[in-house]
Amino acid sequence: MRLKKYPWIVLFGALMLVLAACGGQQAGAPTAAPAGEAPTTAPVAEGPTATPVIEFAQQPQPGQKVIVWMVRTGQTENRWERDVVLPAYAQANPDVFVKVLNINQPDITVKREAMIAAKEPLHVWSTNWGGDGFASDRYRGLITDLTPLIERDKVDMSDFLPDVLAIYQSEGKQWGIPFLTTGSYIYYNMKLFDEAGVPYPTTDWNDKSWTWDAFVETAKKLTKNTDDINTAVFGTDYAVLNLEGPPMLFGHFVWPEDAYSTGFADKVNVTDPKAIQAYQAMHDLVYVHKVSPDAAANQAMDQLGGSFGSGKLAMNMEGGWGHWVFKDYIDDPNGFCWGVAPMPWGSPDAELRTVIYTDPWVITAGMDAENTDLAWDFVKFLTSKEQQAAYTNATGTPPVRASLLADYYKLYEKCMAPEKMKEVFEGAFTHGRESSNHLLVRWDELNTTWNNILSSYWDDPEGKAADVLPQVEQAVNEALQRINAEK
């Protein structure tokens, strides 16, 4: 995930380690999270407070077999790994020791690839934590085809959300087992809506009254006192969820239709009129409609608890990690109730208009049969119904098993009816596409290419999408030509 939306202080607290994994940009927010990952599951701690790294035992007992599991540094996930996963797995498999490599996410790629190149033991990891993501790792032969193992052991995959499971299928093979998935949404502060007498947005992804214009008009009704940060309320912000995010809202997909299945694109198209309209529409939220904070306002809100957490942002366009990062606001006496709405329709044909972020567990390719079986047994354990439930309970992240979702939605029923949460959460999977950084080879290079050009556009009050996007298209297409030539 590539995130350039939150100011850096909020990013530090929300991500901790990182975060698919994912992506976004906002005017005045130059910090981008590492590729391949959603924010840490820890409740947002909006401020640069250092926390100690959780340590894991590193030495097995004599005679134990060893599995090496690479994870990302983050307090909540690391506590789940240490206090939930390891004891449960040790009880079921006393002859196996799980050696945990707890790595800061920005360092994962270099460490992982160095280990694989040196043929050091590395059994289980996630492709989207650092680096170019799943597509590059699959193309380079770093991960194992799990299909023969699934078939051999007759593993029942029917409980996994089909659209989610399919993300890590290609060439008729299953390359990873998802353990986390979410879409992108509009999070909104119910208290601010109530105070302004504004109705809550729909939860129905097919409700075509929830247009971009309706979104902007709603933001205008909620915006007030923007010249005084102490009393200000901003109607919304925006998130550029990778290069494809804004055009999807307006009915245009910038990549060729086969790019996500092959991992390669021969060209990108961001000069389509809908793409230009989309990028300009997001820019106009700050500089024309003045319903979204600029760089100075973002920095001021950092000091007041962050953009959404400060209670000064009515609608927060965000990747679905908001479900767990914002969860504690609901029960905090000084917090507030929030709800979730679909991404708005920029165009009547924008059926697929949200970016999805899904992380899988994978197994290193090229190991002998014994180590492959050890790794596979551990992946089956991690993705079992019992451990999926334990992961959700420990971290707040949504399960990828359909049988567990009903209980997940009840976590938010203090503020939002479970059936409404279900409608809006699951609607993303029928109205979205997986993030490009998970499915395009050499995504890091591409991301750097377009961000180098777009970064100044978001901070320029006079910026014009029609002027900057042809530069982006030319530069990205040149990068694609280089990548394709090196295949």
Image: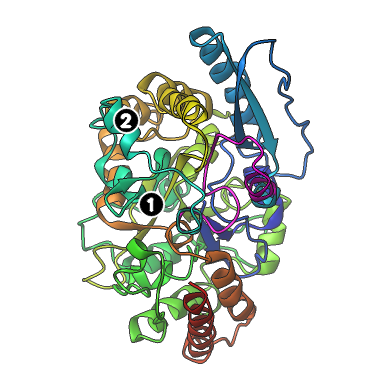
In the rendering, at what x and y percent does residue 82 appear? 63, 21
Secondary structure at numbered mark 1? loop
Quick one: label 2 or label 1, which is nearer the N terminus? 1
In the rendering, at what x and y percent does residue 131 appear? 59, 56
Q: Is residue 316 visible?
A: no
Task: Give whichever of 282, 112 is nearer the camera.
Answer: 112
Question: Left of 476 or right of it: where is 264?
Answer: left
> Badge 1: how crowded within 10 Å, few (<14), some, or many (20+)?
few
State which quadrant residue 431 falls in: bottom left
Task: Give whichever of 150, 311 is nearer the camera.
Answer: 150
User: Residue at 36% of width from left, 22% of height from top?
Assistant: 385
Secondary structure at numbered mark 2? helix
State the CA–CA distance, disc 2 to disc 1: 32 Å
The range drawn in magenta is 111-135
Q: Which residue is mark 1?
A: 197
Residue 295 in the image: above or below residue 402: below
Residue 346 in the image: above or below residue 79: below
Question: Left of 186 or right of it: where is 127?
Answer: right
User: Was residue 115 drawn as part of the magenta stretch in this picture?
Assistant: yes
Q: Nearer the viewer, mark 2 or mark 1?
A: 2
Is the residue under label 1 in contact with that under label 2 (CB below 8 Å)? no
Residue 39 in the image: above or below residue 74: below
Q: Which residue is mark 2?
A: 405
Question: Left of 175 or right of it: where is 230?
Answer: right
